[in-house]
Image: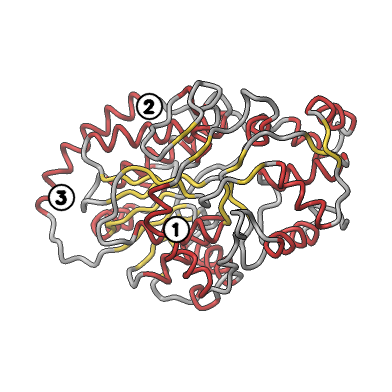
Amino acid sequence: MTLVRRGALASGMRARVTRMASVRARMREDVTMAILLTGATGFLGSRLCAALLRRTDREVVCVVRATGAGHAEQRVRGLLRTQDPEVAASRALRCVPGDITGDGLGMGRAEHEELCRTVEQVYHCGASVNMAAPYEHLAPVNVGGTARVVEFCLRGRGKRLHHVSTLGVFLTARESGRPEVTEAIRPSPETSGRIGYPRSKYEAEALLTEAAAQGLRVTVYRPGVILADSRSGACPADDFVARVYAAAVLTGCHPRCLSRLPVVPVDHAAETIAELSLRPAPRSGAYHVMLPEALPAAELFDWARSFGYPLVEVPPATWHAALKAHGRSRAALAMRTLAIAEYGLGLSEDRRMPDYRCAAVTDAVTGAVTGAVRQLGGQAGLLDQSGLFGPDYFTPMFRALVDRQVLPPP
């Protein structure tokens, strides 16, 4: 697939907005409103699907890569059963085979036209989340897929788009002269940098800025570093945190870290997005989905030591040498190719994350989200009095990584 050209896409969107405005004005408004969700089989997307089903009686339509409707249902409901069996059985859930990079989101024509008429809220959580992949590999899904979702939003009934981005769009903000990032600041090529994943997510947001200027209602949610589910400890085997731990345990050491990480457990992220988006008058703009207190990256390794891994802190150069010495190991190779770790961990004064602010989220939903997580059996009281995680959160996470053989037993 060829790379996406943002200028051409934006030009096309302007023409579609003009054409669709008159069409929407003639549409009947008594059609049952539905929600469309992409990325429902992902780590965050599956939990967002469950949160939406718990909080609304609207039909939630999930567009899923599948061989047919039955396969799509099997994929989504199978994931939901591991999180919330009651939600997994919901009659409000509908799963449609499709592909967000294809025309009409890869759906059949009749189904696509029906959903253009009946969907009012679109949640775009689908993305290729490969921190080590180059931009060219990620752009077709992360940029091209977003363009297809925008096209869908501009057809038929007027829609609001809830787009899940990442705080990684500000990964190099400090290096580019912006040490603090609030929700009012827009990302740029300078703040996202050249690393593939954050660059692709910035380009997707740039498309949305063009669409919003032409009349599309857009709200952007930027999660920070997504951590394990606070109820089960479940976490992906190949995400940033898991790769960092695998490399540290392999080498027996970790680098001296300067960054403070904007973190959020995945269930808190899902509940935050659902809470904000389903309010009677959701605002446009951006939300930083993170816990109020950033986490010193060095504490990632304190947790590992508490669990029983005897890790030693070393200078970054020594850590790189240790990874090179284990060059044939999958864990070491993954870490060496993960350029994002330079900033995520903060291996130098310039290459460390900016200070993120999340006032809009903190002011709006903190109490409601912790209450929702508590009702689901999660650890709503994740922070101690000093604003840091308590030990009960991390034990299930490490156990899950050991059970999946990402880490050896300590």
In this rendering, the label closer to the viewer, 3 or 1: 1
Q: Amino acid at mark 1?
A: Thr
Real-space Cα separation, disc 2 to disc 1, in angstroms: 30 Å
Position of 296 relative to 97 (above/below): above
Which disc is residue 272 wearing? 1
Real-space Cα separation, disc 3 to disc 2, in angstroms: 26 Å
Real-space Cα separation, disc 3 to disc 1, in angstroms: 31 Å
Residue 17 point in image, percent of width and height: 20, 38
Which disc is residue 296 wearing? none
Residue 61 point in image, percent of width and height: 39, 62
Position of 221 relative to 55 (above/below): above
The answer to which of marks 2 and 1 sits earlier in the sequence is 2
Residue 172 point in image, percent of width and height: 55, 27
Say what secondary structure mark 3 lies in. Answer: helix
Residue 144 point in image, percent of width and height: 43, 36
Residue at mark 3: 24
Camera-nearest residue between 193 and 84: 193
Displayed quadrant of residue 368: bottom left
Residue at mark 2: 6
